[in-house]
Image: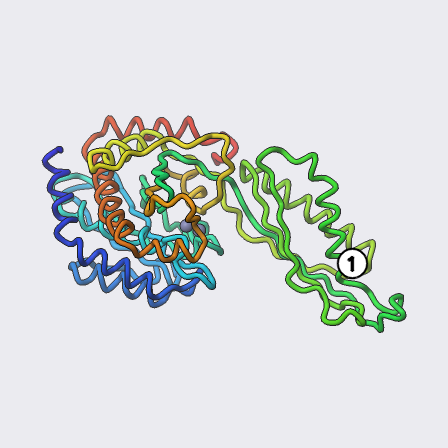
Amino acid sequence: MNQQKQKISEKIESIRDDLIELSHSIHKNPETSFNEYKTVAIIIDFLKKYGYDVQEKYCGIDTSFKAVIKGRENGPKISFLAEYDALRGIGHGCGHNIIATCAAGAFIGLAEIIKDYAGEISIIGTPAEEGGAGKVLLLDRGGFDNTEYALMMHPSSGGNNLVGRGGRAASSVTVSFKGKAAHSSVPSNGINALSAAISVFNQIDMVRPNFRIQDNINGIILEGGVASNIIPELSVCEFSIRAETMLRIKELITLVEECIARAESLTGAKAEIKVEPIYAERYPNMPMCEAFKCNMSELGVEMFYPDPTVLYGSSDIGNVSIKIPAIHDYLSITDDKTIQSHSSEYTKAAAMPQADDICIKGAKGLAMTGFDILESEEFRNTINEFHTRQVPEAYRK
Ligand SMILES: [Zn+2]
Ligand SMILES: [Zn+2]
């Protein structure tokens, strides 16, 4: 191993127990999107303990933060991204405690050598990945304006150490229909809000055969009446929308809005619509992915490129990857193929010894990849050229 990488790796190894404790503390205090107050306090205390200044409430977001260390002069700006939100009901079933720990470890590891290099490294706390799109808010507020390269990992399962995996674009639409209650013996005295909701589902199903392969709209009814002898006055439903690109998501949102408008005019119920921010599709920076893969291989973890036919999920790292070169590669925390993320079994796995080991290896791999970027201008040019070619023209302003 390269001498500097050895030094970085040894630094991370020397704080192994502390990093694992950090992961476990986050795991024990699961907090959902934008409510990660205790978690952020834990991470900030950890960074301060190692002597780093932390900018709290970064970009005016209560549960975001940033810490920066500068090198000997100006140069490439590398950020390690920490996620730390949990899932309602099942805690850290997406293993974001591991993401936060890897980012903190990578930051401290690379800090070990930054003084000898031009550039700066940072850790950015990115809240609300599971809902609320914290990174989209950070992007809107300039939170990534001082980042040229964004690096993070994500835990996976079943031995799926996947590098360069993409992600689909996604959003969700919530609609409340307001009707008028009436005795069910005389339905004409009321306005049936549930009928309006059902009509939206039926209309979407009518056009479903025309969907593209990656298009998907899945709906649930959150409220649909209180008693069967009352004409429902209120209905609320929520639709998760996925597609290949953000541009296609916009078209599907319009489609849902049109279905809602027709349901309104058919039933007389009035709709109120809330559209969530769009999680963009992901553009993994392949030169950076390849470097991460090589570094993980040196650490004894073999990574693979994914099956392109599999339909993947979504993350707000996609929006970041449109703006700057980014990686979001997957390290498996359990060999058990039956354990799926977003389950209580996965929550348990996220604080088991195999996951703890990934906290350390992931931190090392990310820090070593950060080092590759710091060290070589030629590598940076390759990364930047790839990014320019990869991101579609439509996203460039
Ligand atoms: Zn998740
Ligand atoms: Zn996740």
In terms of depth relative to the viewer, which is nearer, 295 or 47?
A: 295
Residue 266: quarter of image? bottom right
In terms of depth relative to the viewer, which is nearer, 10 or 335?
A: 335
Whether residue 140 is visible here, answered yes or no, is: no
Whether residue 49 is visible here, answered yes or no, is: yes
Q: What residue appears at the point 28 percent right and 58 percent down from the top-left corner?
A: 23
**Label 1 packing within 10 angstroms: few (<14), some (14-19), many (20+):** many
Is residue 24 found left or right of 320 in the rendered image?
A: left
Q: Which residue is mark 1?
A: 195
Q: What residue appears at the point 52 percent right and 41 percent down from the top-left corner?
A: 169
Residue 263: x and y in percent read 77, 53
Q: Is residue 193 above or below residue 152?
A: below
Residue 186: x and y in percent read 90, 70
Dot 1 amino acid type: Ser
Q: Is residue 140 above or below residue 285?
A: below
SS at circle 1: helix
Q: Quadrant of the N terminus?
A: top left
Find out if the beta carbon at label 1 lies less than 8 Å from the nearest ligand 1 atom: no
